[in-house]
Image: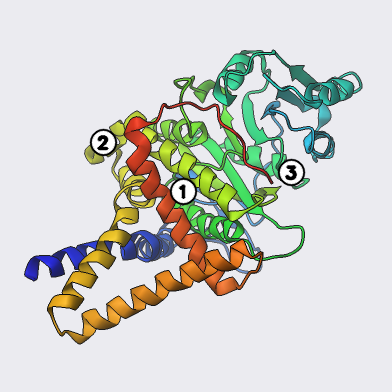
Amino acid sequence: MKLLEIVFWISAFFIFYTFIGYPLLTYFLFRFERLRYFIRFPEDSGKVFINPEIAGKIILDQRFHIKSYTPFVSMIVAAYNEEKFIEKKLINCLELDYPSDKIEFLFVTDGSTDKTPEIIKKYSEIYPNIKLFHQSERQGKLKAVNRIVPFTKGEILIFSDANSFYNREAIKYLVRPFQFEKIGCVAGEKRVVSKDGKLEAEGLYWKYESFLKKLDSEIYSIVGAAGEIFAIRKDLFLELPENTINEDFVLTMNIAAKGYRVIYEPNAYAIEEPTKSIFEEFKRRIRISTGGLQAISLLKNLFNIRKYKFLSFQFISHRILRWTITPISFFILFVVNFLIFLRADILFYKIAFYLQSIFYLSGFSGLIFELFKLRINLFYLIFSFILMNFASVIALITYPFKPRTNIWQKVER
């Protein structure tokens, strides 16, 4: 009985720490960092002094009086069979508020069998800063990107997706922090917006992630960028193994491991439609979790807490626990709680078991409602949360048997 109680509390701790404890801890550290590093001038001036040595620990926003900065940048867009979105993406690129003579757009469409290359070619004949790279063989996004990086002219590389669309000032905000030498990567904000205004679990998840990124960025460094919108110094680009799944995460973490700051810039954002169904999102989550497990191996050097200190702490707390221990803890907590419930008449454990049962029954109800094209927000969110963690469990079980490849069937949006 004592052993069961110990396992119960350990499982509960991992769940609480991952989703509530770590955010609370980073919030308190964030408040402490602001007290240490923000030196305010008199209120009437509205100015804030920034020490460049610690600039990577803070978010650069409109309050900060820093000079205009417009280096030559190269935006790389990997587009596989994206004829549904590609023209809208091209127009979005051309409407960005950045000098046209200081930006180039490189579209790589390897393996595309629809009209994506033709549409891009039509625009490239009119606009000289739009360039098309195409070959008939599909070898995956990472190999396609590795192939065209040597052709880029920019000192800053921006990575984007064909189905995500930037706000007009995004490029200016993304490149501005690179004035500071310690900044190696700037990550924008991913926003998932539904056309019909329906509540989307994916969108809420990214709001939660954005909140954590803001805190992580101000304290030290964010733990991975959203692949839809991030920028790096070209000389920090690293050719990763071609089977890398979460290439954006591994690339940005390698930059952080080199001692550069990876910061978050919410004023640069990419808007994307949600996945077509929660089940499409489930497939995507399994893939992301599988890529996360692979990343643990590729980034195993970050477990050296003595060398990487707070970055190691962030890596473990924000990512490793989510991909490994925490999803399993949900299952262990329920089973152990059930065994205690059967063996002992202890009110606390009875209440805990009833609450867990209600939670999972609510999630199951959310599944039933989704199957019938109904949506009750509370049940839907609980179902989505359970599904996200279940996807991580599936990834853990199948990881040893799955071939690692970054070529995959995209989800419908």
- 7, 301: nearer the viewer: 7
Q: Is residue 99 left or right of residue 137?
A: right
Image coordinates of residue 103 in percent, x first then y, are 75, 27
| Residue located farthest toward the left when viewing the structure as drawn | 2
Q: Position of residue 288 (x, y in %)?
A: 48, 41
Q: Residue furthest right?
A: 126
Label 2 element class: helix
Give neighbour class at mark 2: few <14, some 14-19, many 20+ (Cα, 10 Å). few
Q: Which residue is mark 2?
A: 307
Q: Nearer the viewer, residue 183 or 387?
A: 387
Q: Quadrant of residue 259?
A: top left
Q: Position of residue 379 (x, y in %)?
A: 53, 71
| Left or right side of 54 for 158 | right
Q: Nearer the viewer, mark 2 or mark 1?
A: 2
Residue where numbered disc 1 is placed: 57
The relative height of residue 59 versus residue 379 in the rendered view (above or below) is above
